[in-house]
Amino acid sequence: MCEPNMSKLISAAAAAFLLTVASVRADEQVWDVDNWPGDIDLIPCSAWSKTADGTWVLHGSIKLGASVVNDIGVKGDAAAHKLDRQCGAKK
C-alpha cells in the first residue's frame, strides 16, 4: 500500500498529465464546415501534411454541425485530389 504522501504525489502527477493532454487538445485548430468534403478548401494548406503513402492528414479537427471530428485523413478520393491540386505543389 502507498504511504499517504506517495498517494498524494501520484494523484498530483496524474492530474497534471490530464491537464496537459486536455490543453494540447484545446489548442488544436477547429474548422467549421457546412459541407464535407465540399468545403475542404476552407482549410488552409498549412493545416495539412501528406504522408509517404499519399494520405493527406489534417492537423486539427473539423466541426460539422454539432459534431467535432478528429483524426481526419483523406486518400484517393475527390477530397484528396482537391488537396493535391491546391496544396501538393506547396509541400
Image (cartoon, grey):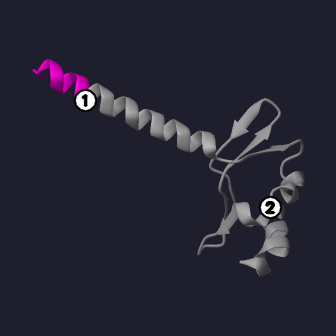
Nearest to viewer (mark 1 / mark 2): 1
Q: Mark 1 points at which residue?
A: 10
User: Under tag 1, what secondary structure?
Assistant: helix
Residue 72 in percent (x, y) is at 67, 52
Q: Are marks 1 and 2 in contact (CB under 8 Å)?
A: no
Q: In which quarter of the image is residue 68?
A: top right
Residue, far bottom: 89
Residue depicted at 17% across the width and 26% down the height: 6
Q: Does label 1 or label 2 sit earlier along the sequence?
A: 1
Which residue appears at 39% of the width and 37% of the height? Answer: 17
- The quarter holding residue 15 reads top left
How crowded pointer 1 is (Cα within 10 Å; few <14, some 14-19, many 20+) is rated as: few
Residue under numbered circle 2: 44
Is residue 75 one of those drawn in magenta? no
Magenta part mainly helix, strand or loop?
helix
Q: Give the range drawn in magenta.
A: 1-9
For badge 1, the amino acid type reads Ile
Q: In which quarter of the image is the N terminus?
A: top left
Residue in front for this viewpoint, 38 or 16: 16
The residue furthest top is 4
